[in-house]
């Protein structure tokens, strides 16, 4: 039982760091620019498709990685310059409408280029097996790689935010946007940098997630909802909050899905137990969000 | 001149007797999403059958109208209402998924149209819910997996973990497997839109059964097998699978990891009968090395059944005569023995298959032995027509 618990906890952490890679960009964009970007999931999808395409052409998973990052970053910069920049001073409804339109366009563009069929990619050589972590616990190497990459990115972002001049501006921007502008900082350049960085991380998450499930149209929307919950729970604009919230939500979600049906099975038939268990598990992270907002209305690590 | 040409072509039409409207066949199927290739296979084989006859089935001109249900029951229902209500179609086919069939079929047959299923055969429509206008050419869902239960029992296993998505066909799958397996079965239900099975892998490892049975159609099956391998379970715990979890597309995606897996089927491309050989040759001539799955074979057999009935009746205007003609199942099935049971579901044979490496090291399906002979399904007795 404890082995199972550890394995499910690892699964939760792996889901959590994937959420973090997405949430990091989203929380900065939301916190600093005040823009709700629904199309963040499209950047995740674009990264996955571009990287998958390059990996298939070159035959190397690792050559696909820079292509995925570059494609997502370029797409992000283009979206910022062409659409988002016009929305900074509009209200949130306009932003939601415009970025929702971007989702539809991105999905159709991908369908035109790659078709509706999901694409299944292979794992990189050396990461296609599993390693023995404990006696009786073999864990897929690739999932460990995702956890390692997620933690490395978290550490890198912490250094960037807390130890560099850019990070200082980001922190200042998240706390008081108008004051930063009044002090003569080129806020437009800062916005572009932040948006590009967020897009790049979304592309990284998408490309890493590809070989586990499938690269398919709409893959971004599936995970985007959970990402927004992470941003809200963590506190808008806070990278640290996003990290903590992503891990908590990832583990809670996985644990509920893994163990709730088993518990319910003690008192009802397996099919009913799974139906109800999965149903409650799907609500789990939203209940958690409601609870957090009740106690701390601005999230766990609110910036202001 | 123009008028003369028009008159002449009208005369020519009248002489050959093709002035009659073609019989419209409505195909509601799943073409998008991870399971989109399932519908594509059914459609492609059906189109191939029509092409082989030069636009006809059983000597009667037909027009096939295909729409994608997107694996959404309400969408399937909407298409069915358009086909039957607005366009007055009397013959529908194509549905892949049992949840879509469950919504669409009762509606279609209630309006007096005939529905011939090339795939889904849910239990609730096979027993008390059976209907004279509803035919299933493929199999009843449970029967598909009962064969795997038989195989696992014959291979000497007594403790199994069975996994399937939590919808009608998934429940039918586990029920069917358990019925024939007879041993101890731990049931785990997944979701129909799930692509990450890490949590299930951990549960399988913890249960440590002698054999794993899983039913995950289309893209889900690809993800499941890949993750089973990634989790290091593939060499450890053997799997016995039903045909939807081992089709040619899944094998291509999974690659060499699939070699050695055992499964069960009602048809495989290496069947040694004239109808099957003709179908495989026609498929390869038109589609080249596009994977050929049982879904395509079911689409083909559905078209051949419809052709056999149209040959007798010449159309669907007399729906009673057409229904009788379908019931006779007077066609050469690619699977060999085929007839309809009392609930108009197939009575057929089941076979053990094994995945072996071909000359290039790629996985290939080889038929081993007959597991069950001339069996119908467990719900036929409950059907009162």
Image (cartoon, helix red, strand yellow):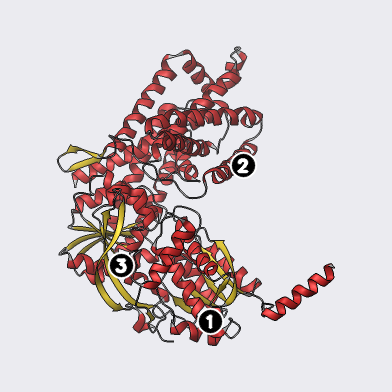
Residue identified by numbered label 2: A101
Residue B104 coordinates in the image, percent (x, y): 51, 70
Helix, strand or loop for disc 2:
helix
Question: Are the numbered discs 3 and 2 placed on the same chain, yes or no?
Answer: no
Q: Is residue A27 above or below residue B180?
A: above
Select label 1 or label 3 by which is in front. Answer: 1
Callouts 3 and 2 close, C-beta under 8 Å: no
Query: Residue A37 falls in which quadrant of the image?
Result: top right
For residue B171, side relative to residue A225 (left or right)? left
Front-lying residue, A26 or A214: A214
Q: Chain of mark 1?
A: B
Quadrant containing the N terminus of chain B is bottom right
Residue B197 visible in the picture: no
- Say which residue appears at 31% left-offset and 30% top-offset: A148
Q: Chain of mark 2?
A: A
For residue A20, side relative to residue B354 (left or right)? right
Q: Which one is earlier in the sequence, the residue at label 1 or at label 3?
A: 3
Residue B247 visible in the picture: yes
Residue B194 coordinates in the image, percent (x, y): 39, 51
Disc on res. B311: 1
Q: Is residue A261 above or below residue A102?
A: below
Helix, strand or loop for disc 1:
helix
Select label 1 or label 2 by which is in front. Answer: 1
């Amino acid at each position: 039982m404890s082995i199972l618990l550890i394995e499910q906890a690892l699964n939760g952490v792996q889901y959590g760091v994937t959420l973090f890679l997405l949430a990091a960009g989203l929380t900065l964009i939301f916190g600093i620019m005040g823009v709700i970007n629904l199309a963040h999931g499209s950047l995740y999808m674009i990264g996955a498709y571009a990287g998958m395409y390059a990996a298939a052409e070159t035959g190397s998973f690792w050559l696909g990685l820079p292509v995925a990052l570059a494609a997502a970053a370029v797409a992000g910069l283009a979206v910022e310059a062409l659409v988002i920049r016009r929305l900074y001073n509009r209200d949130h409804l306009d932003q939601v409408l415009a970025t929702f339109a971007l989702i539809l366009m991105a999905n159709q563009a991908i369908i035109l280029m790659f078709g509706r069929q999901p694409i299944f990619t292979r794992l990189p050589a050396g990461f296609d097996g599993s390693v023995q972590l404990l006696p009786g616990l073999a864990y897929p190497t690739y999932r460990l790689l995702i956890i390692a990459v997620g933690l490395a990115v978290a550490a890198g972002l912490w250094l960037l935010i807390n130890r560099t001049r850019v990070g200082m501006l980001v922190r200042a921007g998240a706390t008081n946007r108008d004051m930063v502008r009044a002090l003569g900082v080129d806020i437009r350049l800062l916005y572009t940098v932040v948006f590009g960085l967020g897009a790049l991380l979304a592309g990284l998450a998408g490309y890493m997630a590809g070989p586990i499930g499938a690269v398919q149209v709409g893959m971004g929307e599936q995970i985007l909802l959970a990402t927004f919950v992470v941003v809200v729970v963590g506190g808008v604009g806070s990278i640290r909050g996003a990290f903590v919230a992503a891990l908590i939500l990832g583990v809670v979600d996985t644990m509920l899905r893994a163990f709730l049906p088993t518990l319910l099975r003690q008192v009802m038939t397996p099919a009913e137990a799974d139906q109800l268990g999965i149903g409650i598990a799907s609500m789990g992270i939203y209940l958690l969000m409601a609870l957090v907002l009740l106690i701390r209305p601005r999230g766990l690590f609110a910036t202001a | 001149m123009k008028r003369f040409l028009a008159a002449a072509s009208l005369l020519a039409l009248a002489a050959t007797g093709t002035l009659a409207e073609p019989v419209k066949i409505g195909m509601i199927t799943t073409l998008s999403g991870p399971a989109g290739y399932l519908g594509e296979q059914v459609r492609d084989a059906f189109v191939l059958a029509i092409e082989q006859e030069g636009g006809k089935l059983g000597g009667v001109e037909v027009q096939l109208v295909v729409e994608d249900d997107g694996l959404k029951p309400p969408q399937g229902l909407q298409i069915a209402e358009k086909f039957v209500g607005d366009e007055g179609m009397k013959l529908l086919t194509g549905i892949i998924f049992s949840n879509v069939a469950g919504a669409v079929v009762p509606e279609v047959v209630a309006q007096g149209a005939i529905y011939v299923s090339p795939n889904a055969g849910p239990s609730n429509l096979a027993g008390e819910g059976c209907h004279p206008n509803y035919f299933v050419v493929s199999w009843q869902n449970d029967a598909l997996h009962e064969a795997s239960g038989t195989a696992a029992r014959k291979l000497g296993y007594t403790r199994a973990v069975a996994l399937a998505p939590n919808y009608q066909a998934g429940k039918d799958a586990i029920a069917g497997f358990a019925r024939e397996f007879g041993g101890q079965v731990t049931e785990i239900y997944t979701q129909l839109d799930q692509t990450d099975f890490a949590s299930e892998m951990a549960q399988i490892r913890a249960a440590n059964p002698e054999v794993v049975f899983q039913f995950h159609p289309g893209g889900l099956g690809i993800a499941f097998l890949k993750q089973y391998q990634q989790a290091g379970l593939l060499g450890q715990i053997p799997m016995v699978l039903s045909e939807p979890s081992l089709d040619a597309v899944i094998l291509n995606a999974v690659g060499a990891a699939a070699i050695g897996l055992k499964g069960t089927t009602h048809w495989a491309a290496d069947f040694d009968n004239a109808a099957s050989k003709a179908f495989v040759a026609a498929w390869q001539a038109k589609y080249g090395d596009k994977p050929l799955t049982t879904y395509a074979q079911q689409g083909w057999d559905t078209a051949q059944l419809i052709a056999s009935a149209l040959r007798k009746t010449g159309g669907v205007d007399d729906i009673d005569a057409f229904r009788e003609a379908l019931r006779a199942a007077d066609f050469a099935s690619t699977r060999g023995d085929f007839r309809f049971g009392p609930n108009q579901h197939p009575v057929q044979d089941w076979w053990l298959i094994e995945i072996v490496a071909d000359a290039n090291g790629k996985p290939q399906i080889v038929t081993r032995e007959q597991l069950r002979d001339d069996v119908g399904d467990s719900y036929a007795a409950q059907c009162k027509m």
